[in-house]
């Protein structure tokens, strides 16, 4: 029997609601991954990603796997065994970066901040000073587990100041808040398609600076992942017409990405950031009118991921179940240290719209009354 999923409004930490035109793009006829028309599509996707990331980086492409693969691609290509990496952690995903570093056989120097606060720049500066031989500083720009944004520009600047590479996770950031890869001077940046791009899950846009490319091409050891080795991937995604088979690209998913990036370009990055901010303000007003509080200080809040403190005496799982069953709205639970303590309400991409804010606030009011 065929599978027909229910219609949900996706207001959790991702995936977010997919643009209707993106779903339609998925159903277009599959063509070969070396078809000249497909190569033309790949070139357009690269340009659209350069626009989204605000970069001229030549090495800008979607990895054919989800955000975690984008993360892994940055680490396995830039870091070698016995290297040292400064890893900032203020939520779940900084912890995943540490895992990546250690599995390579490198050392992670952790800079920890409490969950719900931004990365402390003084601590990063102190760690760089104390470990001048570290090869890179890695951090999460938009922590999906807590709803916090950190100052990516300042952290990339510290990395440059100490001659280190910067590795930036902006899986939840891209298209929701300003991401400015060239102005930041960031070296390796990855994202995901299932958050503010409102595409289907399963791809990870990445971009590497020219300096990062040079580091990759002059490694002492081969990249231990064959699939994620950028030297090989570039044979397929690189400039020029001589594209060679590396892996079978997820053809239809790339149609979907092209469509969602076209939607973003047509709206304009600034307009997209402003829309995310506007709907966040509306949600905040609705939640506060109900007496609910946001976890994160106003200056550090992500407009696309709202972390709401669960009031005393409320069974948070029951509320989420009620929203799903009665209103077909998905919101997220807390992760890690914040499990049971918060809800995570996403207003990402296509899900960031006034009607969603209204129905979510009404549904929560009903569940909490
Ligand atoms: N980094 C951050 C900040 C994320 O929010 C996520 C997913 O939610 C990931 C990495 C991993 O992405 P994926 O689940 O697509 O592998």
Image (tube, rainbow, N blue to C red):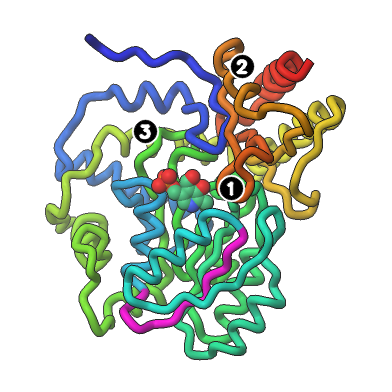
- Tell me, yes or no, if residue 161 can be seen here: yes
Q: Residue at x 59, y 56 (%)?
A: 91
Across and down, in percent, residue 2 comes to 25, 12
Q: Residues within 10 Å of mark 1 (few under 14, many from 20)?
A: many
Q: Residues within 10 Å of mark 3 (few under 14, many from 20)?
A: many
Tell us which disc is closer to us: 2 or 1.
2
Spatial separation of the CA atoms under disc 2 and disc 1: 22 Å
Q: Earlier in the sequence, mark 2 or mark 1?
A: 1
Quarter placement of the C terminus:
top right
Q: Is residue 117 above or below residue 343?
A: below
Q: Residue at x 21, y 25 (%)?
A: 29
Q: Nearer the viewer, residue 198 or 312?
A: 312
Q: Is residue 165 above or below residue 261?
A: below
Q: Residue at x 41, y 77 (%)?
A: 211
Whether residue 86 appears in magenta in the rendering, the answer is yes
Tell us which disc is closer to us: 3 or 1.
1
Whether residue 330 appears in magenta in the rendering, the answer is no
Q: Residue at x 58, y 64 (%)?
A: 89
Residue 322: mark in rendering: 2
Across and down, in percent, residue 32 comes to 14, 37
| Residue bounds of the magenta highlight | 79-90
Spatial separation of the CA atoms under disc 3 and disc 1: 26 Å
- Tell me, yes or no, if residue 52 can be seen here: no
Residue 256: mark in rendering: 3
User: For residue 269, what is the image quadrant?
Assistant: top right
Element on which disc 1 rests? loop
Residue 145: mark in rendering: 1
Tell us which disc is closer to us: 2 or 3.
2
For ligand 1, tell me if the residue under mark 1 lies within 8 Å: yes
> Farthest front residue?
313
Q: Nearer the viewer, residue 215 or 312?
A: 312
């Amino acid at each position: 029997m065929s599978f027909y999923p229910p219609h949900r409004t996706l207001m959790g930490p991702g995936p977010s609601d997919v643009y209707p035109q993106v779903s339609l793009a998925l159903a277009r006829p599959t063509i070969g991954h070396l078809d000249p028309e497909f190569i033309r599509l790949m070139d357009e996707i690269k340009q659209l990603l350069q626009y989204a990331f605000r970069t001229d980086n030549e090495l800008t492409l979607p990895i054919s796997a989800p955000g975690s693969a984008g993360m892994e691609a940055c680490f396995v290509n830039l870091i070698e065994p016995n290297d040292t990496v400064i890893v900032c952690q203020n939520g779940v995903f900084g912890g995943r970066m540490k895992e990546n570093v250690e599995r390579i056989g490198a050392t992670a120097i952790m800079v920890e901040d409490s969950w719900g606060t931004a990365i402390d720049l003084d601590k990063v500066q102190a760690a760089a000073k104390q470990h001048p031989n570290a090869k890179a500083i890695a951090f999460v720009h938009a922590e999906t587990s807590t709803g916090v944004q950190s100052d990516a520009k300042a952290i990339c600047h510290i990395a440059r100041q100490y001659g280190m590479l910067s590795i930036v996770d902006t899986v939840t950031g891209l298209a929701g808040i300003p991401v400015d890869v060239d102005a930041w001077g960031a070296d390796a940046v990855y994202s995901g398609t299932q958050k503010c791009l409102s595409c289907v899950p399963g791809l990870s846009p990445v971009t590497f600076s020219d300096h990062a490319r040079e580091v990759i091409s002059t490694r002492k050891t081969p990249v231990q992942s064959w699939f994620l080795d950028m030297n090989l991937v570039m044979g397929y995604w690189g400039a020029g017409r001589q594209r060679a088979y590396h892996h079978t690209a997820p053809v239809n998913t790339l149609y979907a990405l092209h469509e969602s990036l076209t939607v973003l370009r047509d709206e304009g990055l600034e307009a997209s950031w402003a829309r995310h901010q506007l709907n966040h303000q509306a949600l905040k007003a609705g939640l506060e009118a109900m007496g609910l509080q946001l976890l994160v200080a106003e200056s550090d809040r992500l407009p696309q991921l709202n972390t709401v403190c669960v009031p005393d005496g409320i069974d948070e799982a029951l509320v989420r179940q009620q929203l799903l069953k009665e209103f077909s709205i998905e919101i997220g639970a807390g992760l890690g240290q914040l499990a049971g303590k918060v809800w995570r309400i996403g207003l990402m991409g296509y899900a960031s719209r006034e009607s969603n804010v209204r129905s979510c606030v009404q549904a929560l009011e009903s569940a909490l009354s």
